[in-house]
Image (cartoon, rainbow, N blue to C red):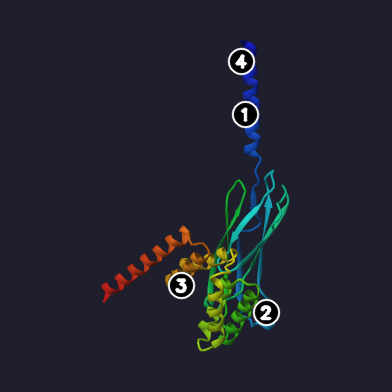
Amino acid sequence: MLKKVQMMKSILFVYFVFLTNVCNSQPIIEFKSLEYNYNTLAYPSPPDRQIPKIEFVFYNKGNEPLIISNVSAGWCCPRWSKQPISPNDSGSIIIVCDPFGDHIGPFHVTGTVYSNAKNGSQLIQWHGKILPQDSGNIYLWNIYWADDIFDHKRYTYAKLYYERALKTEFNEQYPQSRINICDSLCNTTISKKDYWIVREWADDSYDNKRYLEAIKYYKRVFEIEPNDSWAKDRIENCNMFLNNKSSINENNK
């Protein structure tokens, strides 16, 4: 009987040590810096474009490989290390900021880094000011990117750029004709890659209280994922904020 008790204690001890090692064997992400100041960004024309980039360097301080699963970056484009980062090694996240027409002036963007790290998701921030130039440059810039994205058959994403171009030169027929083509192609050829991009644009509009614009983008999300509950809740919130604003304006008359 005594031997059985001692054996059970030994088994429990080994099991406890095993669980302790498993719990402690996790990656830990640590950034060199969580914030970046862009200062000022010019709005260049496509032939002379020099796209600004930020590099957020991070380290794996744990004892298991670190894997970055996704990075949200608002209206900017993130790129990150796709391979697992070994313990004590480093990786980086590159944020590419293309100034858009409706982002003229000060900006402050918060991104979220999702990974398998023990310390969970991390927030990174960058801010600065975009200097305006003439609307012709803004128009050409958006057309340049829209055409490039269209050629890669990402029609939902391309449509967003054509719409931005149309805001600066609303009498131009070219972007409107391309928007119509995108609409017809989107019915059968929507890329799943566009989901996070369109959703980030929608969230950016929502966070900056541009609720009508946010509703438009969240409806685009439904084109890609018809059962998306996030977009549904956000549209309801947008309508609530718009109704409250309308009621306040009526009471102030």
- Describe the element under mark 2 as helix, strand or loop: loop
Is disc 3 placed on a helix, strand or loop? helix
Q: CA distance from mark 2 to mark 3?
A: 27 Å
Query: Residue flagged by tag 3: what amino acid is it?
Result: Glu
Amino acid bearing label 2: Arg
Residue projecting furthest to the top: 1
Q: Are marks 2 and 3 in contact (CB under 8 Å)?
A: no
Which of the marked residues, 4 or 2, is nearer the chain's N terminus? 4
Distance, label 3 to label 4, CA atoms, is: 69 Å
Q: Which residue is mark 1?
A: 16
Q: Which of pointers 2 and 3 lies earlier in the amino acid sequence?
A: 2
On the image, numbered disc 3 is attached to which residue? 213
First in residue order: circle 1 vs circle 3: 1
Q: In which quadrant of the rendered view does residue 108 lie? A: bottom right
**What numbered label is drawn on residue 197?**
none
Q: How far apart are labels 1 and 3 at the CA level? A: 54 Å
Q: CA distance from mark 4 to mark 1?
A: 16 Å
Q: Residue 131, image x and y in percent?
A: 57, 79
Relative depth, front residue between 37 and 90 = 90
Q: Read off the residue under disc 4.
A: 5
Please, which residue is most extreme toward the bottom here? Answer: 171
- For marks 4 and 1, the one nearer the N-term is 4
In this orientation, which residue lies closer to the viewer: 124 or 11?
Answer: 11
Image position of 185 (left or right of 54): left
Please tell me which of labels 3 and 4 falls first in the chain: 4
Alpha carbons under labels 1 and 2: distance apart: 59 Å
